[in-house]
Amino acid sequence: MMTALDPRQMAADLGVRLEAEYPLARLTTLRVGGPAEWVFFPATPEQAAALHGVLREQGSDPRVIGGGSNIVAPDAGVRGAVICTAAMNLPPEAVGGERFRCAAGQAIPGLARWACRHGRRGVEFAEGIPAQLGGALRMNAGANESCFAEITETVLLAAGDGRIEERRVAAGDFAYRESFIGREGRFVVGAILRLPEDEPEAIRRRMLSFRRRRQATQPLTERSAGCVFANYPDQSVGALVDELGLKGLRVGGAEVSSVHGNFIINRGEARAADVLAVIDRLREELIRATGRAPRMEVEIWRERR
Ligand SMILES: Cc1cc2nc3c(=O)[nH]c(=O)nc-3n(C[C@H](O)[C@H](O)[C@H](O)COP(=O)(O)OP(=O)(O)OC[C@H]3O[C@@H](n4cnc5c(N)ncnc54)[C@H](O)[C@@H]3O)c2cc1C
């Protein structure tokens, strides 16, 4: 990490947990990836913004990881600082009317269950997405004809100088599986969500039907990073992979799922290199079949820098 300050000293000064040479395979749902040189685990939005400010002041541009459910991490690991939001999994806080302040590390399945228990609708579409709120906003994660942009009033961002900046969501901030957060390279420390009241039983019923649909269409018991490619505007990539007979395609321990053609699963011993080889092969075949390059949905982290 290109900083004058010792990362250990920095973490101790801010009261943030720090791990050295921490395996990225432990932080990603695909379970591949070598060690990250430094991983910081801030516990609150305030601590995360302060940490981010100090790192930026020291000339470091930290990577961020949430649930690690959309990342292929490199076998060689990464150099420098990674901020993991997993410890920022605090209970949502009511801030007036139907508005709730949530931290970036809020696990989405837990948030959906909490909302159901408290008679608040809006998140049930996302119950099966193994993300955290920051990553879900960055990707504008969606399912069942809904997405995070629809329930977000304000995004809480690290301002870069240690403070938290509040950004009210405006037209154009979010689109299909992408957002201003990625475009502008921002770090989300939390958000204010709008969750109107509803009958817990009605919410529970919707959640159950979404869960059944997901169980029938996704390999939920396998290790994966969700959809590899964003769907074409007019065509589902999973269906096309199926039509092309590519389900089951395997390199080393990485295999195209037989349940969903846009998922690559780790059969147990996969390396990132195996996953990347399968991705390359799928991309070639999709281009051959459609004449169009598919847009990546998973993010591929490159080697140590
Ligand atoms: C079984 C399975 C099912 C899935 N189903 C769906 C689905 O139905 N719909 C869908 O849209 N996706 C789905 N996904 C993909 C994935 O869950 C989403 O892309 C999700 O939004 C990623 O969130 P995350 O917290 O895991 O982010 P990560 O994978 O940790 O990170 C993804 C990106 O967001 C950035 N990021 C993470 N946290 C922050 C933050 N606090 N501030 C700024 N940037 C940040 C990272 O740097 C990276 O660029 C699925 C994945 C799996 C494994």
Image (tube, rainbow, N blue to C red):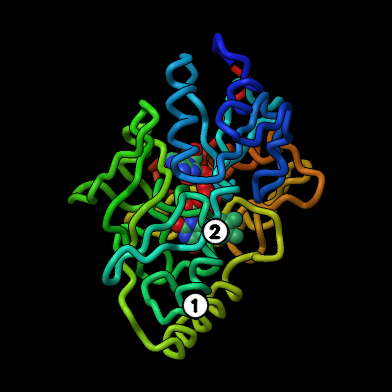
Mark 2 vs ligand 1: CB below 8 Å = no
Q: Is residue 244 visible?
A: no
Quarter of the image with the N terminus in it: top right
Residue to which mark 2 is pinned: 107
| Residue type for callout 2 | Ala
Tell me which numbered mark, 1 or 2, is placed earlier along the sequence. Answer: 2
**Up/down of 284 relative to 196, above or below:** above
Residue with the most extreme right position: 269
Spot occupied by residue 217 in the image (x, y as percentages of width and height): 57, 71
Relative to residue 75, is residue 4 drawn left or right? left
The structure residue drawn at horizontal position 43% and vertical position 50%, both measured from the top left corner, is 230
Task: Judge by depth and name the residue closer to the eye, 42 or 250.
Answer: 42
**Secondary structure category for the residue under label 1:** helix
The answer to which of 235 and 222 lies nearer the viewer is 222
Residue 113, compared with residue 137, is above or below; it is below
Q: Residues within 10 Å of mark 1 (few under 14, many from 20)?
A: some
- In the rendered view, tell whether residue 301 sits above or below residue 125: above
